[in-house]
Structure formats: C-alpha cells, structure tokens
Amino acid sequence: MTDNLGIKHLSTITGQDLGEGIGIDYQFAEPNHIVAIRTIIPKTTLKIESGTTVVPGAILYEMEIHDMFGVVFQGNPWMDRKLLLPDAYPSDMPPPLLKTTSSEKIRKAVGVEK
C-alpha cells in the first residue's frame, strides 16, 4: 500500500489500550503528506501480522508495543526479546500499559518498592 502512495518513511507506531481492544496507529510521512492507519486488535486475540516484511524499521516499534501491551506481531523475528522491560519482569505479570495492570504490583514484582 505504501508503495502505491510513494511513501517510504515510517514515522512511528503507537499503541493504546481502548478497553475492549488495543489500538495500533501507524504513521507514515513524506515531505508533502502524512498517512495514518489505525487497526484495533481484540484483547482476546492480541496477534497481528508484523509489518517488518514491508517496512523493516517497524521491528523496534513492534517490540515496544509487545512489551507495553502484550501484542504479538507474527513474523517479527525479535518477539522473544524485551526492548523496554527489564529482563527480570515476571512472565506472569500483565503488560504494564494495560488499563487493568496495577503499577503498584509491578513495582513490587520487579523490586522497585517493598
């Protein structure tokens, strides 16, 4: 799709907890125009195809959204790594930016407070 528009630059990908699902916004930019694309993934699924096959630079943005919201980008070769979360982040803890996640429980689990 971006080839048809002549857009080559991915500016950012952002995630947002919308309650029932996770919104993922892709922003592509060129000097004369910006294209924004939003998709919403149900929290019951939390899987989407990776954009890295079309835009290799999406790899780090997808890792960030995976860490913070738990979305799995199928085809992203780095889904088994953490980008922003500490290695000691408990695997049984929910992702930190979900509205239902308790920041107090996270701080205690990673040893920031007692």
Image (cartoon, grey):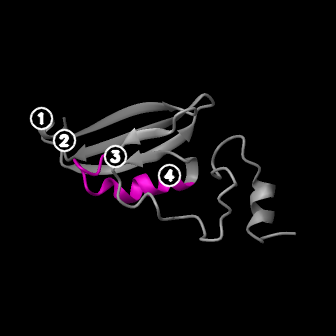
Question: Left or right: 60 with respect to 41?
Answer: left
Crowding at label 2, few (<14), some or many (≥20) Cα neighbours within 10 Å?
A: few
Crowding at label 3, few (<14), some or many (≥20) Cα neighbours within 10 Å?
A: some
- Percent position of residue 93, x then y: 70, 54
Q: Which residue is mark 3?
A: 50
Q: Is residue 64 above or below residue 24?
A: below
Q: Regarding mark 1 in the picture, which secondary structure is present there?
A: helix
Question: Residue drawn at (47%, 30%), measured in percent from left and top?
Answer: 40
Q: Regarding mark 2 in the picture, which secondary structure is present there?
A: loop
**Mark positioned earlier in the residue sequence (1 or 3):** 1
Q: Nearer the viewer, mark 4 or mark 1?
A: 4
Q: Nearer the viewer, mark 1 or mark 3?
A: 3
Q: Is residue 36 above or below residue 13?
A: above
Q: Which residue is mark 2?
A: 32
Q: Which residues are magenta?
A: 51-67
Is the C terminus in the top left, top right, bottom left or bottom right quadrant? bottom right
Q: Is residue 42 above or below residue 55?
A: above
- Percent position of residue 108, x then y: 81, 64
Whether the magenta-drawn stretch holds residue 73 is answered as no
The three-letter code of the residue at mark 1 reads Asn
- The span from disc 4 to disc 2 (Cα, nearest Å) is 31 Å
Q: Kindly check if marks 3 and 4 are in contact, taking CB atoms under 8 A apart as contact.
A: no
Q: Kindly check if marks 2 and 3 are in contact, taking CB atoms under 8 A apart as contact.
A: no
Q: Which residue is mark 1?
A: 4
**Mark positioned earlier in the residue sequence (3 or 4):** 3
